[in-house]
Amino acid sequence: MSDNQAIENLLSENRTFEPSAEFVAQANATAEIYDEAEADYKAWWHKQALERITWFKEPTVTLDDSNPPFYKWFTDGELNLSYNCLDRHLDTQGDKVAYHWIGEPGDTRTITYRDLHRLVSKFANGLKSLGVERGDRVALYMGMIPELAIAMLACARIGAVHSVVFGGFSSDALADRIQDAQAKVVVTADGAWRRGSVVPLKPATDVAVSRCPSVTKVVVVKRCDNDVTMTDKDIWYDDLMAETSDDCPPVHLNAEDPLYILYTSGTTGTPKGIVHTQGGYLTGVTTTHHYVFDVKPDSIYWCAADIGWVTGHSYIVYGPLTNGVTGVMYEGAPNHPDLDRLWQIIDEYNVSIFYTAPTAIRAFMKWGDEYPDRHDLSSLKVLGTVGEPINPEAWIWYNEHIGRGNCPIVDTWWQTETGSIMITPLPGAVATKPGSATRPFPGIDAVVVDDDGNVAPTGSGGFLAIRRPWPSMLRTIYGDDARYVDTYWSRFDGLYFPGDGVKTDDDGYYWLLGRVDDVMLVAGHNISTTEVESALVYHPAVAEAAVVGRKDPISGQAIAAFVTLRDGFEGSEAMIDELRTAVADRIGAIAKPKSIVFTDDLPKTRSGKIMRRLLRDISEQRQLGDVTTLANADIVSEIAAKAATASED
Ligand code: ATP
Ligand code: MG
């Protein structure tokens, strides 16, 4: 069977979901915006920039492409992101809620735009009093508390560059990131709540700071009241805020001044310090947030990611606040105190837009339908996913059990590097298919190319590439222009190379197939991890699956599968046979896993993505590669022990 045959088998099962007439009638997006953007993409982006952003000085230049791949956007524009997120809303909707914040233990805070403006202004003055100047880097290492968003916006207000480090990272990972950015100040908390216990952050910060001479001051937010030792570099957030004025005029920044550095998840290798700038980034995030999530003045919008990832930067902080939306921010775990915590929040706050990751959806499926079924989720209007390809099975579950058949699902493909959503349905304007991210966002020129960079015909597969620059693109890897050029612009001449595999179907819909590094070559056929994993997840016993290619003397590579079963199923020899047959039926005998190992969990990054490269290392009995971003180290040795004794087909 050819590769195309295999994908066709998979696609033939997929239905198209049309948006309802009611939804279409009220949707922000229309089919025309695709044509308008296509006719002149620069003019279209320029129009978005002027319409959605308040500039101190409006740009006259759209794109400076004089030195590719170092593209610049809106180069003579001046603006301030905290002004756009806060000040400009004060007259019209100062008392509107910016964030309904929900602490894990059950405490809550309601923060209006006016409150947020005051807190951000005070903290910005606080940073200035600690010697932070325009262009200085500030590392932020906290849980999901309002002070994290406050600190980001305070940096943006004075032109300091923030570097958010996910609160679940170790002191080593924090130290590496502080050092790479040469951060001057660190803002942290005493601790963070996680499943009812305190994760101490200050001690980890102490260890990291002891290795980082660039740090002169550490600000500590009191959240958990756990014991901490304060040194002469340290100051309590509350003490700093008690002394500062709430008058802090926003600095007029150039559109191309840096806004932040954010390190990628580290799924494929060592994290990269991605640099984003002001004007282009804000244009990308506000425009996508408006159209992709169909936000309205009365939307209650909840992106359940962590602010420590780009999803949180773009779609918890900058996009929603610039668009003046009311957001929900939740501090804790989805399974605390019970497995229905998220559904209880949606019910209580009447959330209308909900955005999460496939890995979370697969966990909800595993936990059981009874948890969402307990709650009234009728306030929901749009659902989104991001982070990995979503298996059609999980998509359908999300549609039925969370959307209750009434909500368009936006499967959004993008990266830390792209800054904002790149391939996605626009609800109301694009029909969806379970497992497909559908079409490039207006103005985005995403294509499928072959090995030589030639555009592949509609209906075939290859590498994803982006042909023209877009406003929210990364500008470089911090301190390493050569690595920027090498990683993203060297694989294909003049094309941006994201590193993902993709196919289009006959309707021109895009199906993301996982990372190029993970593609398996079995007996001369390219097989994508996503296809085989989706075939496994179709089986009613399977909650989650990861497959990798490992060296095989006969077929070149053999497929090794790692499978988490749903509760109530047994990982027997008979189950192995059944799953192999299921894959053969769906894709073809060529894709049958040679070995299947059952495991309670899969190795994941701290953002919840499956780290197939570690499974490859295990399968080929190699020393494990970079594990600094691994969330669950114990599972790796468990899987390794099982893999060593697994039977083979
Ligand atoms: P690193 O680059 O350090 O290995 P990472 O790629 O996991 O880490 P992110 O920028 O957080 O870091 O993730 C972007 C990647 O996530 C994309 O390149 C893609 O592989 C995957 N991804 C995100 N959203 C989707 C989606 N909707 N469908 C398919 N894949 C997705
Ligand atoms: Mg990546």
Image (cartoon, rainbow, N blue to C red):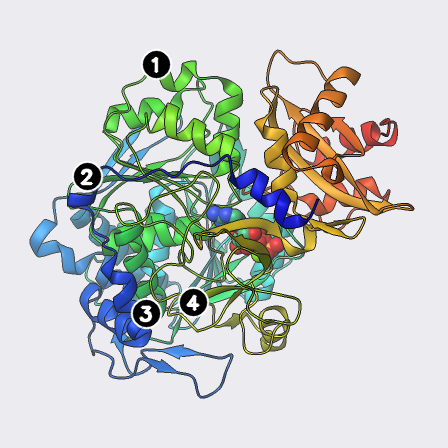
Question: What residue is shown with label 4?
Answer: 445
Residue occupying image coordinates x 31% and y 80%: 62
Badge 4 density bin: few <14, some 14–19, many ≥20, Cα 10 Å: some
Quarter location, residue 615: top right
Task: Describe the element under mark 2 as helix, strand or loop.
Answer: helix
| x and y, in percent, of residue 562 in the image | 71, 32
Give me the C-alpha separation between circle 1 and circle 4.
43 Å
Residue occupying image coordinates x 81% and y 48%: 523
Sequence-earlier tag: 2 or 4: 2
Q: Is residue 541 above or below residue 189?
A: above
Residue 254 at least partly seen? no
Q: Which mark is residue 38?
A: 3
Quarter location, residue 383: top left
* 143 lies left or right of 116: right
Task: Describe the element under mark 4 as helix, strand or loop.
Answer: loop
Q: Which mark is residue 293?
A: none
Sequence-earlier tag: 1 or 2: 2
Q: Nearer the viewer, residue 504 or 56?
A: 504
Task: Describe the element under mark 1 as helix, strand or loop.
Answer: loop
Is the CB–ligand 1 distance for label 1 below 8 Å?
no
| x and y, in percent, of residue 515 in the image | 62, 52
Question: What residue is shown with label 2?
Answer: 21
* 407 lies left or right of 499: left
| x and y, in percent, of residue 289 in the image | 30, 52
Question: What residue is shown with label 1?
Answer: 374
